[in-house]
């Protein structure tokens, strides 16, 4: 078996896979359609300031921490505890939700209703057969109706553009921070007594995670990866969009891509794809059968529009990130709380995230109008006044979140079955697997795929 691998996409999964292969002497060619690396976790620079597409913190277990710090020096990274809050009514609550925090801050009648519904739901789960046929029923069956209506229903609908009734129950297992409520209920109520008696730290019992954030933004990590790929003779083509994958029987033999208006073709022994699975399937020749292409058209991603502001003020938020249910944006973050090396001295950066569908009204909105709208809402929150804002701009990502609509698994399985028949095509990453993955998961996926290719190529 030969040695050349074409890697589609220079997000964290593609770059990390390419790095692991190149490190072992395999020839890699990475194709990235954008002018910059990093994909969803990349950076954009304007007016001497660095912005993420929504803040991107690395959450690393011990194995991944070791890998991460083999690539970037620890002196270049800030380490901190996660610190986010969500606004319900006029109060901020810890996010993910913390049972004690809710108990302290909520209206006693609401607490009573939440607890009685929660206990009823638990009893019902034990004594009768509760059906989980959507994200809505999944949550109500486990946490009760009141918690669901207050803390889950509206926010989820806003983020996903779908009512939880139309979201698959499996989605809740992977995605909803509300699920930490179960951990926190267990941790904070059951073990709070232990804490009081033994004086143990609160951290052990609540959902606090350590984050690792490169001081110059996640883009610094991708530069290090790219340097390592280059130093092992790997190639990264930017502005290079996949045009087609040519099949020779059950193997992919060539990959064509469009760069600077030309179509170029490379021969390959393996292909690793991290691009959206439905787009990949459409680029394979000979063309897939029409039920497969139909399934590809039915998988949907939620897009994200980011309104970025450079503000002449410091320490604006009481947390690193704030979530909102009743604003145009779902979440807003402050760059200086991640690293004060991202923006020029005396300023801070804010990034407001708005989920939408590609080509809808928000996606196509005029940049200035969108900035004005977000600015107005942030002013109403008393964070700053308009004259504090020195610069604003909008960025967009089409494939922000895979949408787990009720029937998504059927369509996804059709695509997976088709791809599994192509012996040397490995599909991975957030867009390839159509899963809500974090960056550390992406690195693990890259590690696994590189391992599979290395063992196959040595046979
Ligand atoms: C708002 C937001 C905040 C997040 N915050 C965090 C966080 O704090 N911590 C965390 O761990 N994770 C976070 N995530 C998740 C994280 O962004 C992803 O897990 C990770 O970036 C996915 O990497 P990937 O390489 O699999 O996919 P991507 O980053 O999407 O990379 C795929 C690449 O393929 C390229 N591509 C697509 N089509 C083609 C084509 N036809 N030809 C060539 N190239 C193509 C794309 O341009 C892209 O660069 C966040 C996600 C979002 C949306």
Image (cartoon, helix red, strand yellow):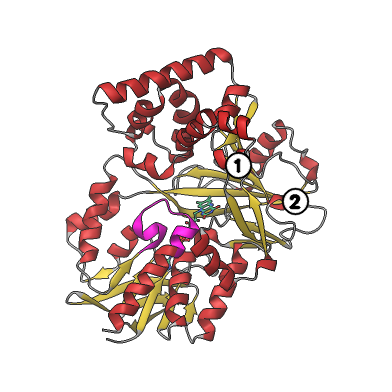
Q: Quadrant of residue 104?
A: top right
| Furthest-right residue in this view | 346
Magenta segment includes 173: no
- Mark 2 secondary-structure assignment: strand
| Furthest-front residue in this view | 198
Q: Nearer the viewer, residue 108 or 352?
A: 108
Kindly identify which residue carries mark 2.
Answer: 348
In the rendering, at what x and y percent does residue 241 appear?
42, 70
In the rendering, at what x and y percent does residue 381 appear?
70, 32
In the rendering, at what x and y percent does residue 217 appear?
64, 61
In the rendering, at what x and y percent does residue 157 appear?
44, 34
Q: Residue at x 38, y 33 (%)?
A: 164
Relative to residue 155, is residue 145 depicted above or below?
Answer: above
Q: Badge 2: few (under 14), some or many (20 or more) residues near its Cα, within 10 Å?
A: many
Kindly identify which residue carries mark 1.
Answer: 203
Magenta range is 428-443
Q: Badge 1: few (under 14), some or many (20 or more) residues near its Cα, within 10 Å?
A: few
Q: Are marks 1 and 2 in contact (CB under 8 Å)?
A: no
Q: Nearer the viewer, residue 32 or 185?
A: 185
Answer with mark 1 or mark 2, whichever residue precedes in sequence. Answer: 1
Relative placement, left or right, of 318 versus 64 is right
Answer yes or no: is residue 3 visible. Answer: yes
Q: Nearer the viewer, residue 434 or 261?
A: 434
In this rendering, which labeled residue sits more in front, label 1 or label 2? Answer: 1
Look at the image and tell me in which quarter the N terminus lies: bottom left
């Amino acid at each position: 078996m030969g040695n050349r691998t074409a890697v589609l996409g220079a997000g964290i999964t593609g770059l990390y896979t390419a790095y692991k292969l190149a490190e072992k002497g395999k020839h890699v060619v990475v194709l990235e359609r954008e002018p910059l690396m990093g994909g969803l976790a990349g950076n954009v620079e304007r007016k001497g300031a660095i912005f993420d597409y929504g803040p991107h913190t690395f959450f690393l277990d011990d194995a991944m921490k070791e890998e991460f710090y083999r690539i970037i020096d620890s002196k270049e990274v800030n380490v901190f505890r996660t610190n986010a809050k969500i606004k319900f009514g006029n109060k901020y609550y810890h996010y993910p939700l913390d049972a004690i925090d809710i108990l302290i801050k909520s209206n006693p009648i609401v607490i009573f209703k939440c607890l009685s519904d929660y206990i009823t739901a638990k009893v019902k789960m034990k004594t009768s057969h509760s059906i989980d046929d959507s994200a809505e029923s999944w949550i109500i069956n486990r946490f009760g109706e009141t918690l669901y209506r207050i803390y889950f229903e509206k926010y989820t609908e806003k983020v996903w553009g779908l009512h939880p009734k139309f979201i698959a129950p499996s989605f809740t297992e992977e995605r909803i921070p509300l699920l930490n409520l179960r951990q926190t209920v267990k941790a904070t109520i059951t073990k709070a007594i232990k804490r009081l008696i033994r004086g143990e730290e609160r951290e052990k019992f609540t959902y606090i995670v350590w984050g690792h954030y490169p001081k110059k933004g996640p883009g610094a990590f991708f530069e290090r990866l790219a340097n390592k790929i280059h130093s092992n003779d790997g190639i990264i083509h930017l502005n290079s969009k996949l045009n087609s994958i040519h099949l020779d029987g059950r193997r992919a033999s060539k990959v064509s891509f469009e760069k600077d208006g030309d179509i170029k073709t490379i021969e390959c022994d393996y292909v690793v794809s991290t691009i959206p699975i439905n787009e990949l399937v459409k680029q394979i020749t000979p063309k897939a059968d029409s039920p497969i292409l139909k399934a590809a058209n039915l998988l949907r991603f939620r897009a994200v529009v980011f309104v970025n502001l450079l503000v002449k003020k410091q320490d604006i938020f009481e947390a690193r990130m704030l979530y909102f249910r009743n604003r145009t944006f779902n979440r807003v973050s402050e760059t200086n709380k991640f690293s004060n090396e991202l923006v020029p001295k005396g300023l801070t950066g804010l990034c407001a995230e708005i989920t939408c569908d590609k080509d809808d009204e928000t996606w196509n909105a005029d940049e200035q109008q969108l900035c004005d709208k977000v600015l107005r809402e942030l002013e109403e929150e008393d964070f700053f006044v308009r004259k504090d804002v020195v610069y604003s701009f909008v960025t967009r990502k089409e494939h922000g979140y895979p949408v787990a609509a009720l029937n998504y698994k059927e369509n996804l399985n059709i695509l997976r079955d088709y791809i599994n028949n192509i012996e040397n095509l490995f599909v991975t990453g957030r867009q390839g697997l159509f899963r809500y993955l974090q960056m550390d998961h992406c690195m693990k996926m890259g590690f696994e795929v590189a391992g599979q290719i290395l063992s196959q190529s040595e046979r």
